[in-house]
Amino acid sequence: MPHTICHLEIPTTDTKRSGEFYEKLFGWKIDYSWGPDYALFNTGEGMLTGGGLDRKDKITPGNIIIYIQTDDINAMLAKAEKLGAKKVTEKTEIPNVGWFGLFTDLDGNTIGLFTPKE
């Protein structure tokens, strides 16, 4: 499997407010069915057509998370650590969707790994 960018998350303190902003600004379709702390957006075009609005209590500007698709999250987390990264989140299931894991790179950027459920 190629390691392509498959998802990104924009942190927000107010999911509904951010969703309305991006919907009005870009015409994105917003799905609020994930609960009050998370919404999916769909841009409707291009290779990467969507991502998430992830509610946080405190925002660190510039902390958008991109997700790289991989067949083996555990192996990629181990490889990242061997190269100097720090594991943030172990492989974790997203029910009915797949699995994710997080690490911070050498500069402290959070990078996500994702394996879809098949």
Image (cartoon, rainbow, N blue to C red):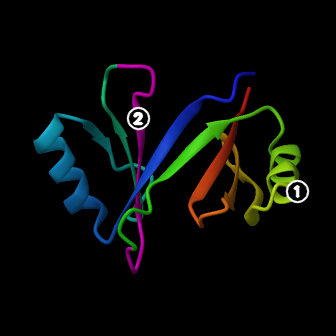
- Which marked residue is nearer to the observer: mark 2 or mark 1? 1
Q: Label 2 belongs to which residue? A: 50
Where residue 25 sits: x, y (%)? Answer: 12, 42
Where residue 21 sits: x, y (%)? Answer: 16, 52
Q: Secondary structure at mark 2?
A: strand
On screen, residue 25 versus residue 60, left or right, reads left
Where residue 95 sits: x, y (%)? Answer: 67, 47
Res 72 quadrant in image: top right
Label 1: few (<14), some (14–19) or many (≥20) C-alpha neighbours in 10 Å? few
On screen, residue 22 versus residue 100, left or right, reads left
Q: Label 1 belongs to which residue? A: 82
Quarter the C terminus occupies = top right
Kind of residue indicated by mark 2: Gly
For image coordinates 80% across by 32% down, the residue present is 71
Label 2: few (<14), some (14–19) or many (≥20) C-alpha neighbours in 10 Å? some
Q: Is residue 12 above or below residue 4?
A: below
Res 58 quadrant in image: bottom left
Q: 82 and 40: which one is in front?
A: 82
Kind of residue indicated by mark 1: Lys
For image coordinates 68% across by 45% down, the residue present is 113
